[in-house]
Image (cartoon, grey):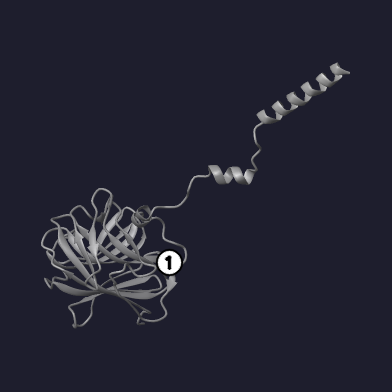
Amino acid sequence: MKKLFCVLCLALVMTGCSQSNKPESVSPNTASRETKPATGTSPATNADSPGPVPSAGERIDRPVEVSFEPSGFPPDWKWLDPDRADNPTKYDLKSGGLRIELPTGKDLFGENRTAPRLLKTIAGDFEIETKVRFDPRESYQGAGLLVFRNDSNYLRLERGFGGLGGGDNGIRLDIREDEAYEPLATPEKFPTDAPTVELRLRRIGREFTAFWRPPGGEWKEVARYAPNYPETVQVGLIACNTAGPLPVEFGYIKLAPPVR
């Protein structure tokens, strides 16, 4: 009897040891929560990577004036500074406009796609207008409006100095279609040394029309261009500089349905 009791006690002890050595089970959901790394994109990465144009854009059905506030950029506008890590572009919004301290080496030409820009995704027909305070003195320095499909397809309307096709101070319109880059208008054809100009781009269907004027003057057509762009593109401001550092200030952005 004593032997039987000892055998039972030994069996109970062995069973307890076996259970204490068994790993604790973890439900799949618990394991996932404990081991899954944090996700998300840092603000710097999100702000500095152009990426693809979103498929959905805002339709402009009434006039809108976009103002700049010290608290930050307007909603739905994205600031891009592609080489921020190596050559950051300083800016401020304190004056009620967008003032940029433009360093050298910033461009959107060839393989250099480092120009700072402020963009909004828009669908359909529209007009965009801005006022640029800028005094370029070397080639190439330019600032103005950008319509951006992707890194290899865009158009630039700028108050600039020099650039492809010649000329000194003036207005220029440049386009890129895949590997081909072409000036449609140069400072030689549209000369001006005005420190402040107003620029406008109009889209109706496939056709884009560029205009410029001195403040309060009459609008002058620069050129027309009808690329095979999708309905949705990014539009906004751009500043380029491959010469000495200089400031540029954008006074406002106006969006409106196009005048037909």
Q: Nearer the viewer, residue 236 or 84?
A: 84
> Mark 1 falls on what kind of element?
strand
Residue 231 picture quarter: bottom left
Q: Residue at x 18, y 80 (%)?
A: 215
Near mark 1 (Cα within 10 A), the count class, few <14, some 14-19 or many ≥20, is many
**Total label count?**
1
What residue does disc 1 label? 232
Q: Nearer the viewer, residue 65 or 232?
A: 65
**Quarter containing the N terminus:** top right
Left or right: 111 in relation to 26? left
- Relative to 62, is 43 above or below? above
The amino acid type, in three-letter code, at marker 1 is: Thr
Residue 182 picture quarter: bottom left
Q: Residue furthest front?
A: 2
Q: Position of residue 139 (x, y in %)?
A: 14, 58
- Relative to 237, is 28 above or below? above
Q: Residue furthest top?
A: 3
Q: Position of residue 224 (x, y in %)?
A: 30, 71
Q: Residue at x 47, y 50 (%)?
A: 39
Left or right: 185 in relation to 19? left
Left or right: 169 in relation to 90? left
Q: Position of residue 152 (x, y in %)?
A: 34, 55
- Relative to 176, is 190 above or below? below
**Quarter containing the C terminus:** bottom left
- Relative to 38, is 6 above or below? above
Residue 149 picture quarter: bottom left
Q: Residue at x 56, y 46 (%)?
A: 33
Q: Position of residue 146 (x, y in %)?
A: 30, 65
